[in-house]
Image (cartoon, rainbow, N blue to C red):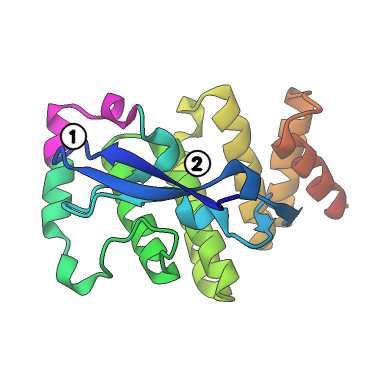
Amino acid sequence: MKDFIRDFAVCPVCQKEFSFDKVASTSIKISSYDLDLKPEYRDINVSLYSLITCPNCYFTFQEKDKDYIYEYLNSLNTEEVKLFLNKIDKKSLPEADNSSSKSHEFYATQLMIAANIYAILGLPSEVVKILIKFAWYYREQNEEEKELGILYYCGKIIEKNYQTFSEEDYIFSLFYLGYINYRLNNKKEAANLFDYLLKNYNNPTNPYLKAAKFLRGELK
């Protein structure tokens, strides 16, 4: 059975069609989770293939948004995105690669571009999710200082925007704000955030509430 499936997308900015490889569901194997629910994959690092990039203009977006990325774009922010993409020195970047042999170097480039694009599109909760994957990238590279720097920045975005999030993203973001404070040794603030979540939400199937309960126990 194949590990990857070939799919196609149309860039919403330049209208060019391009192909990309995505991991087959049967090949997604998780051995464990970190304290912040970062999955530890066996064999294939699925996160590496969560972003796709138009080879023509470098517009980069989450593969999960492939069928409705157009809904986030309008005439105004499309022009802002084009201005951003035109400022990128593409000659200094790795060649766009959406194949199964994508390099970690290009994945880091995708994360940087996508975070900026989703910020332009006015989607701060998605920016946070992308930057968390960027922090995971640096964790995998054993670059803790860079990981913590990105987590700190994520925390600032969450603090500014969390009250506008859907309930699902609200729980997600407050969990991560607690985790970020935990990692930055702000244990009292982390405990307060976890206490708030556990007091106000009671959903035994929500993975972030379960993780918050575990981390709260670690802070006693």
Secondary element type, mark 1: helix
Q: Indicate the secondary structure of the residue bearing disc 2.
A: helix
| Distance Cα–Cα, label 1 vs label 2 | 24 Å
Toward the viewer: 59 or 191? 59
Decide: few, some or many residues near mark 2? Use Cα within 10 Å; few <14, some 14-19, many ≥20: few
Q: Is residue 187 above or below residue 138?
A: above
- Examine the image and state in which quarter residue 24 appears: top right
In the rendered image, the vertical position of residue 162 relative to residue 47, given as above or below: above
Residue type, label 2:
Glu
Q: Residue 165 carries which label?
A: none
Cβ–Cβ under 8 Å for marks 1 and 2: no
The span shown in magenta is: 68-79
Q: For this view, does 81 lie left or right of residue 25?
A: left
Residue under the point 73% across and 51% down: 188
For the point 49% across and 42% down, the residue is 158
Q: Is residue 24 visible?
A: yes
User: Of helix, strand and loop, which mostly describes the magenta segment?
Assistant: helix
State left or right for residue 169 relative to residue 60: right
* Badge 1 or badge 2: first in the primary sequence: 1
Q: According to the image, label 1 marks what residue? A: 77
| Image side of residue 102 versus residue 84, left or right | right
Circle 1: residue type: Asn
Question: Residue 97 at x, y = what percent?
Answer: 32, 61
Q: For residue 159, which numbered disc appears in the image?
A: 2
- Relative image position of residue 27 (x, y in whole percent): 63, 50
- Residue 150 left/right relative to 198: left
Residue 108 in magenta stretch: no
**Residue 98, image x and y in percent?**
35, 55
